[in-house]
Image (cartoon, rainbow, N blue to C red):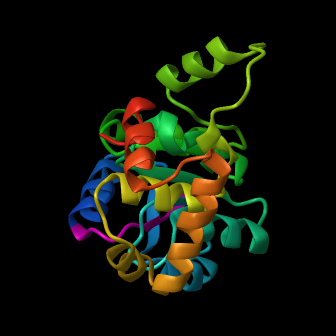
Amino acid sequence: MTDKALIKVFIADDHAIVREGLKQILADTRDIVVAGEAENGVDAVKLFRRSGCHVVLLDISLPDKSGIDVLKQIKKEKPELAVLMLSMHREDQYAIRSLKAGAAGYLTKQSAPKELVTAIRQVAGGLKYVSPALAQELANHLGEDHEAPAHETLSDREYQTLTMIASGKTVGTIAKELSLSVKTVSEYRSRLLAKMKLKNSAELTHYAIKNGLIE
């Protein structure tokens, strides 16, 4: 097989053990090669440019930037590049947001060992990839005439703030993890409460649990 026939993949994930696991899965293929890797969002944007990759495997939860923010930046620079999102979160939580932001596909890390190679080949060929379970869920909702849930009106950062607050994290902790100011996170909190017509974090947490937005 010539080098031109290889699918070059760039991996962006903050956990070294995850990156090594993904590389091990891909090592058993003849048509896919890892062309580079990064452990945070800033390096991902910087290094994917020089990797010559065809597919980016992008963790949705990076330590310095939201994976969806990184996705949007990559797609702005290189719209034709296929980006396959990886996440520990259930598909129904972030898959639709990722696809709307320009992702070519979405994989949970739990399903990656079985689906990774197929997903990479599919998105490298210009197609979208979602798991059979998510495809069925999307099909079930086609044609339904109902008002969108309140959380679907949130921006990506507001939604991320919602899930973190509902998981028991303080505004200060969220600010530190997202590299934002406490004031900025407080503004996100105020906006999402207003949009969802909720009064406080307790009501927000109850909503998140009721709607399956957190484990």
Residue 10 forms part of the magenta stretch: yes
Question: Please, is residue 121 above or below residue 181 in the view?
Answer: above
Compare residues 104 and 154 and report the one nearer the observer. 154
Q: Tell me if residue 12 is in the magenta stretch.
A: yes
Of residue 109 and residue 23, the one placed in the foreground of this image is 109
Q: Residue at x 27, y 68 (%)?
A: 15
Determine the residue positioned at 58% across, 60% down. Answer: 158
Please provide percent x and percent y for residue 147: 73, 26
Q: Residue 179 at what x, y percent from top left?
A: 45, 84
Instruction: Name the outermost residue toward the front.
Output: 199
Q: Is residue 124 visible?
A: no
Q: Residue at x 32, y 59 (%)?
A: 23
Return the x and y of residue 182 as percentages of the image width and height. Answer: 46, 84
Residue 108: tell me if it is visible: yes
The residue lying toward the viewer, choosing from 137 and 13, is 137
Place of residue 63 in the rendered image (x, y in percent of width and height, measured from the top left): 38, 75
**Residue 32 drawn above or below residue 207:** below
Residue stretch rendered in magenta on the structure: 7-16
Q: Residue at x 70, y 60 (%)?
A: 81
Instruction: Answer left or right for 119 relative to 142.
Output: left
Image vertical order of residue 172 relative to residue 106, above or below = below
